[in-house]
Image (spheres, rainbow, N blue to C red):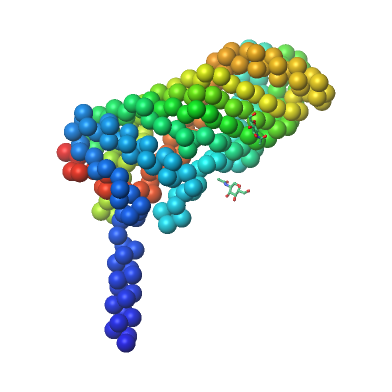
Amino acid sequence: MHYVIGLLCLLAFGANAAPAGTDYFKDLPKCSTEEDQLGECVKEIFNTLTPRLKDGNPELRIEPYEPLRLNRTSFQYTSGTVNGRITIRNAKIYGFASNRAKEVSVKLTGDKVKLRLVTKMPKLNIVGSYKADMQVNQLNLKPKGDFNVTLFDVEATTVTDGEIYEKDGHRYFRLKNIDSKPKIRDLDIKANGIFADPELDKVALNVANQYWRDIYGIMLPETRQFWQPLMLRMFNEALELVPIDQFLKEQPN
Ligand SMILES: *[C@@H]1O[C@H](CO)[C@@H](O)[C@H](O)[C@H]1NC(C)=O
Ligand SMILES: *[C@@H]1O[C@H](CO)[C@@H](O)[C@H](O)[C@H]1NC(C)=O
């Protein structure tokens, strides 16, 4: 009897010791490391995993990401006569689940990987609360409220380089740098609390929505130093959970 239980435990342990997510990823293609085929293969994996992982996977300790939750993020802004700090709280970002890769190219040199992705999502919606402390000329403004921003047709060209490394007998991929240039077709900004008077809020939002291209053009490079490391960290936290052996046909050298 003890022997049978021992054997069952061993079998159960053996099953758990198998590479995480073997079944979950079973249907995905195995990529050949030939450069001309690797890009297409990574694109297929990206486009299959993106919708699949949106609700997370407890077994793989992957958190759901639709919506993506950011508890607190702060941006410092300084330019000419305007400077201050904006803190975003309890932000929820909807839309990444419909992000799709259109073009992928991969360059593999030993364990170094260069990746270029063009991705497209129809809509990215960010809701949350904000609080700012700004100095505009001699004026100190402390707006505080909720916001709801929607970006339409977000096309991002992302260039990354990373490396393949080994841990516990498995190969993993980690990014070292990421550089993303998102372009959008349209932007819709809703917010309250900019001014004490709701009517003034309306006016401010009308202006903001009319001049969104200028605002976006200023905000994007200004905020890059904050969201780019955040992206890098989030990608690497996810990549750390999933060995890539199961996606590669052969050793990369
Ligand atoms: C964000 O807040 C939620 C609930 O308030 C909490 O469960 C979660 O651990 C927080 N996440 C981070 C990264 O701090
Ligand atoms: C944000 O705005 C979008 C588009 O106008 C709307 O569909 C959505 O329900 C709003 N979300 C919240 C939380 O108000």
* In the displayed structure image, the side of residue 239 where residue 81 appears, left or right: right
Identify which residue, 250 or 172, lies in the foreground.
Answer: 250
Q: Which quadrant would the N terminus be assigned to in this image?
A: bottom left
Question: Which residue corresponds to the image point at 67% horizontal and 17% vertical from the top-left?
Answer: 208
Report x, y in % for residue 170.
27, 51
Q: Which quadrant of the figure has residue 251?
A: top left
Q: Which quadrant would the C terminus be assigned to in this image?
A: top left
Q: What is the total number of numbered labels drawn onto the structure image?
A: 0
* In the displayed structure image, the side of residue 162 where residue 55 appears, left or right: right
Q: Which quadrant of the figure has residue 136?
A: top right
Question: Which residue corresponds to the image point at 52% horizontal and 18% vertical from the top-left?
Answer: 185
Report x, y in % for residue 38.
24, 33
Q: Which quadrant of the figure has residue 196?
A: top right
* In the displayed structure image, the side of residue 101 where residue 135 appears, left or right: right
Question: Which residue corresponds to the image point at 38% horizontal and 49% vertical from the top-left?
Answer: 241
- Residue sitting farthest toward the right: 197
Identify which residue, 57 or 13, lies in the foreground.
Answer: 57
Identify which residue, 124 or 18, lies in the foreground.
Answer: 124
Question: Which residue corresponds to the image point at 63% horizontal and 13% vertical from the top-left?
Answer: 211
Identify which residue, 141 or 149, lies in the foreground.
Answer: 149
Report x, y in % for residue 52.
42, 45
Where does ligand 2 appear, by image quarter? top right
Q: Is residue 101 above or below residue 9?
A: above
User: Does residue 171 appear anywhere in the picture?
Assistant: no
Report x, y in % for residue 174.
35, 39
User: Does residue 217 appear anywhere in the picture?
Assistant: yes
